[in-house]
Amino acid sequence: MYEIMSADEAIRLIRDGDCICVNSFVGIENPVELHEALYRRYQRMQSPNHLTVVSSAGFGVWDENRNAEGYIREGAVDRLICGHFGAMPSTKKIVLEDRFEAYNLPLGCISHAIRAQAGGLPGALSKVGLDIFVDPRIEGPGINRLSIDDSFVKYVEVDGEEFLYYKVPKLTVALIKGTAADRKGNITFDDMYMSGDALSICQAVKANHGKVIVQVDKLVNVPSRPRNAIIPGCLVDAIVVVEPEAKDDALSALTGSFEISYDEWSVWNDRIDAASTKRVRNDAIGNIIGRRAAAELRMDDIVNIGIGLPEMVTRHARKNGMLDNITLTVESGSIGGFPVSGEYFGAVIGAASVYDMANQFDLYNNGGLDICFMGAYEVDAQGNVNAHRSDGAFAGIGGFANITAKTSTVVFCLTFTTKGLEVSQKKGVVQIEKEGEVPKFVKQVRSISFSAKRAIKNGQKVLYVTERCVFRLTPRGLKLIEAYPGIDVQKDILSKLPFEVEL
């Protein structure tokens, strides 16, 4: 039977050595007060310690002094298994300092491994990850020199087919954020942007005789409709009521609590963008890339658009009239609507459906997408892409590997160079005003997020859209298929590549 507790009381249920699973998505829907109560207790008692923390999509709030950053930085965590570190500014730096074990697995593969554990299975098979960094034949999921545990990803063959086998440690604590708890402890997510892996996490934790702790905005007397209760009260141990932080009124558009017509998507998006502290690049470079990439969209496409530069594709799909003729999806579980940018990435304006994250990755892993638009740090001579690890920095693979593994058309959106690149466009003519100091096309990527060899084997169409040209992947490597007006092919493209391309 659940109990109503303060955050400090609930955190006492966590013991040294526990494996905590956090339900959140990059920077949204974090149970912030639970994390901060854990940090307060650790500061007082140096306990709980020797923790393992698992999260499919990451659990930061873009602030190194809030949420879990403090207790991770000060040594409470021995091991971190995560899909994405982008919203965790302190943590994503110190994982490279050998302070604790840290493992990066594809977001969807962690989600499916959690669901498998909830069903009494030790792990989940997937073709996602073959021939990229996480494959133990290539590198494995360890991020730093301490991270040598080889049990999380294994290469296996079943009925003559090759797979990777993913597993996570036994989960013993769930930290969840929901909207409300009714008098029976049932948890609803009515005003949340997503429900993520919440149910699977709770089922796995209870099967392992652990503790489920849920932070909610309010208590309600009237039981929720059964379909709205994502977590049944019988799986809940502690409910912590925390009055929600004040939010800009524009964010109400992301809860799905009222209908938003297609004609209003852009208005709400502009309001949310104005309220966000993390804006999407909206300059000549972003517009050139977004406009050209959006030209690849076709009627009735089911689409995923990645974070960063690819988000400009959504804006140009709206401008060219395609937005109402395609279905956008987000890893967090949303189908339809208009995905928002920046710190609220993962939330959607006017979604048609929001379901469990594991179900979304069922769709992605099995080729349910027609086209996707992804970013990239580096591209090499073979067409391999590094999208998770730059020089001296680490963001993580997130859902990138799942999304690109089987999608029919994969479009990478990236600049030709970075750090100082300046570009202008007037009347359709592109001018490189200043070249960037760091090339993004290299002889060999430092780590493989996307395998060109695997894409060719799968028969995927792969494009690399930059601010000056477009390449296409062929069995021989990259082929230059388009240079924009104003671009000198020899001077602006070929002379700046460390390898030859097909013309």
Image (tube, helix red, strand yellow):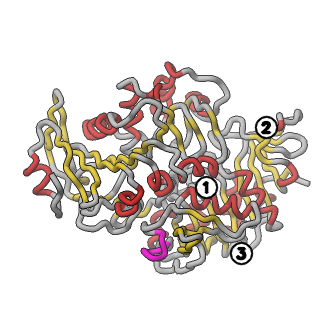
Closer to the chain start, of discs 1 and 2, is: 1
Closer to the chain start, of discs 2 and 3, is: 3
Location of mark 2 (residue):
227
Question: Does the magenta segment cover residue 135?
Answer: yes
How crowded is the residue under tag 1: few (<14 C-alpha within 10 Å), some, or many (20+)? many
Question: Is residue 443 or residue 407 the one in the foreground?
Answer: 407
User: Main SS type for the magenta part?
Assistant: loop
Q: Which residues are magenta?
A: 134-140
Q: Is residue 336 above or below residue 235?
A: above
Is residue 32 visible in the rendered image? The answer is: no
Three-letter code for the amino acid on which mark 2 is drawn: Arg
Q: Residue 5, how many percent across, how many down?
A: 83, 53
| Residue at point 42%, 56% (across, down) | 458
Q: Residue 155, how many percent across, how many down?
A: 53, 74
Location of mark 1 (residue):
67
Is residue 239 rendered to the left or right of residue 470?
right
Q: CA distance from mark 2 to mark 3?
A: 35 Å
Q: Residue 367, how many percent across, how many down?
A: 51, 49
Question: Is residue 161 or residue 388 the one in the foreground?
Answer: 161
Q: Is residue 497 above or below residue 161?
A: above
Is residue 89 rendered to the left or right of residue 213?
left
